[in-house]
Structures are given as structure tokens and as C-alpha cells.
Amino acid sequence: MIRLLLADDHAILRKGLKQLLALETDIEVTGEASNGVEALHLMCDQEFELMLLDMTMEGLNGAELIMRIRATKPALPILVLSMHKIPQMAIHALRAGANGYLTKDSEPEVLLSAIRKVAGGGRFIDSVLAEEIAYYTTFPDRQQPHFNLSGREFEVFRLLVAGSNINEIAEQLHLSNKTVSTYKLRVMEKMNLHSTSDLVRYAVQHELE
């Protein structure tokens, strides 16, 4: 039996996934978290064979959360289930220690296959993203500027593009305003852009919204 910890901040999605997984005889959702802190607590209190993890929950999330999980439970398989079909987000998740990355528009059969494969010690990457990652790995000179951003820098970039200001980003990521401003400056420098409007235009152009 694959005992699964489901971590996602959308209650409706958690309920739908639980109903789907309840139809399987070898998978059982035995833990449910709505944010990163809850996921960490549950992970320490119970034993699981797999964590099914959303990358963009409020508060502690993304690559930082994966690294925290990996530091505490190095053997726990982590399968990211994300709404973002962005190669860089998959790369950051895998570099942080995730064992797989799947998008939320995948077919249920693909999700079930990914769960079983990752829980069994394998790796799984969304096929479309795998092709894009392979392309940019093969031709690094053709990488777009956003590929040069670190995981935290990309997170700040994504929130700026979504319309959040420095104060809101600092609160959401549990950072100081000064630290967020420093990340914003680094993003601008690495991408050779000069304003938030430039970042928004870039995001739209490269489908990163």
C-alpha cells in the first residue's frame, strides 16, 4: 500500500484527488496538508511512502520546501503536482530534490502511473516539459534569460508579474522587504530589464504568467 501525504492549498483539488485515489486498491491518502508548514509537521509525525506536493502554496513552498523535506526525510519520494508548465520550475524542483514533476492538466491515468513509479523509487517528468528541458540542456546557448534565475529569484519574478508588491511578497515568502528588494534587483540585472512592466511583458511573451 502506498501511503500518501497530499499537500495542496486548494481544498476542492484535495477532495477531488482523494476521491480519485480512493478508487485504487494500492494507494491511500493518509495525510492531508494545506500549506508547507503543515506538510512538514505531518511528515515528521507519520510515515508515508510518497508526498504529492503543490509547488506554489502560500508561505513556505517551492524549492525551499522541497529542500526542507529532503533534509528531514531524505528517503521520502516527492512527486510535484503543479499548475505551471514551465521548464524552469520543473528544473528547480528536481534540483531541490523532487523525484518527479507533473502538471495538473495531466490525465488521471498519467498521475496514477507517476505515483506508482515515484513511490517505487523511479523518476517521472511530464513528457512535454521533459522535451523542453532536454532541448535547453542540449543547447544551453539558446536558453532564455529567465533560466539564469535561482529558485528564489524566479519565485520573486513570478509574484511580481502576478501583481504583488514588495511588501506582499515579503509577507508571503516570510522575508524582509530589503531581501525581496535585493532579489528584485538581481532579477532585473540577470534579465537585463528595467521595470516591473518589462517583467510583465517578458512573462507574457514567454508564457510565464
Image (tube, rainbow, N blue to C red):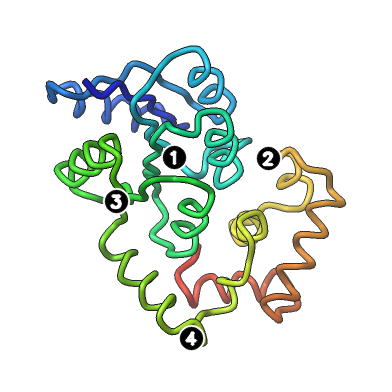
Q: Residue 149 placed where, x, y %?
A: 63, 66
Real-space CA distance between mark 4 and mark 2, rounded to the nearest whole angstrom:
33 Å
Q: Secondary structure at mark 3?
A: strand
Precedes in sequence: disc 4 or disc 3:
3
Real-space CA distance between mark 1 and mark 2, rounded to the nearest whole angstrom:
16 Å
Q: Could you tell me the amino acid type at mark 3?
A: Phe
* Circles 2, 3 touching at the beta carbon (< 8 Å): no
At horizontal 29% and vertical 34% (from top left) the residue drawn is 119
Precedes in sequence: disc 1 or disc 2:
1
Quarter occupied by residue 153: bottom right
Q: Which mark is residue 172?
A: 2
Query: Is 179 left or right of 23, judged from the image as shown?
Result: right
Q: Secondary structure at mark 2?
A: helix
Precedes in sequence: disc 4 or disc 2:
4
Real-space CA distance between mark 3 and mark 1, rounded to the nearest whole angstrom:
15 Å
Q: Could you tell me the amino acid type at mark 1?
A: Asp
Q: Residue 161 placed where, x, y %?
A: 61, 62
Question: What residue did someone put label 4 on?
Answer: 142
**Comparing labels 4 and 1, the label whose residue is closer to the camera:** 4
Question: What residue did someone put label 1 on?
Answer: 54
Real-space CA distance between mark 2 and mark 3, rounded to the nearest whole angstrom:
29 Å
* Circles 3, 1 touching at the beta carbon (< 8 Å): no
Query: Is 178 left or right of 1, judged from the image as shown?
Result: right
Circle 4 residues within 10 Å: few <14, some 14–19, many ≥20: few
Query: Is 127 left or right of 176, judged from the image as shown?
Result: left
